[in-house]
Amino acid sequence: MKTIPVPKARKPKPKTDPHYSAAVQRAKDVAERLRRAGIIDAEGHRIRTDLPADMLDGQDRDYGG
């Protein structure tokens, strides 16, 4: 039986995403708002890491369920 040659698949050139630049800008805007509000620092780390007294380990908590 004669075999049929199969053409090699070419990698298609990736297309640019038309929404990418807008998404990056929205993320930068949100990060800037969080910095101005004092929630994160310049590196993106949360500034406040303490918890209210009723959320600490060992407390009797009611989850409202």
Image: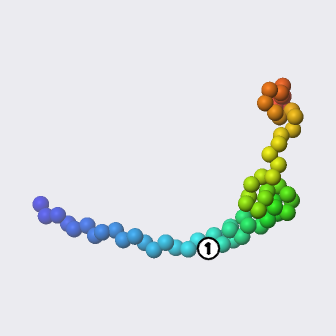
Q: Quadrant of residue 63?
A: top right
In the rendered image, the vertical position of residue 14 relative to residue 42, given as above or below: below
**Which part of the image, by quadrant, shows the N terminus?**
bottom left
Residue at 72% across, 70% down? 25
Residue at 30% across, 69% down? 8
In the rendered image, the vertical position of residue 20 relative to residue 51, given as above or below: below
* Whole-percent x, y for residue 58 in the image: 80, 26
Task: Quickly name the residue at label 1.
Answer: 18
Q: Is residue 65 visible?
A: no
In the rendered image, the vertical position of residue 24 relative to residue 61, given as above or below: below
In the displayed structure, does residue 37 sit left or right of residue 27?
A: right
Q: Quadrant of residue 64?
A: top right
Farthest left residue in view:
1
Q: Nearer the viewer, residue 21 or 34?
A: 34
Q: Is residue 60 visible?
A: yes
* Whole-percent x, y for residue 61 in the image: 83, 28
- Label 1 neighbour load within 10 Å: few <14, some 14-19, many 20+: few
**Which part of the image, by quadrant, shows the C terminus?**
top right
In the displayed structure, does residue 36 sit left or right of residue 23?
A: right
Residue at 73% across, 67% down? 28
Q: Quadrant of residue 30?
A: bottom right
* Whole-percent x, y for residue 26 in the image: 73, 67
Residue at 76% across, 62% down? 42
Q: Nearer the viewer, residue 45 or 3?
A: 45
* Whole-percent x, y for residue 3 in the image: 17, 64
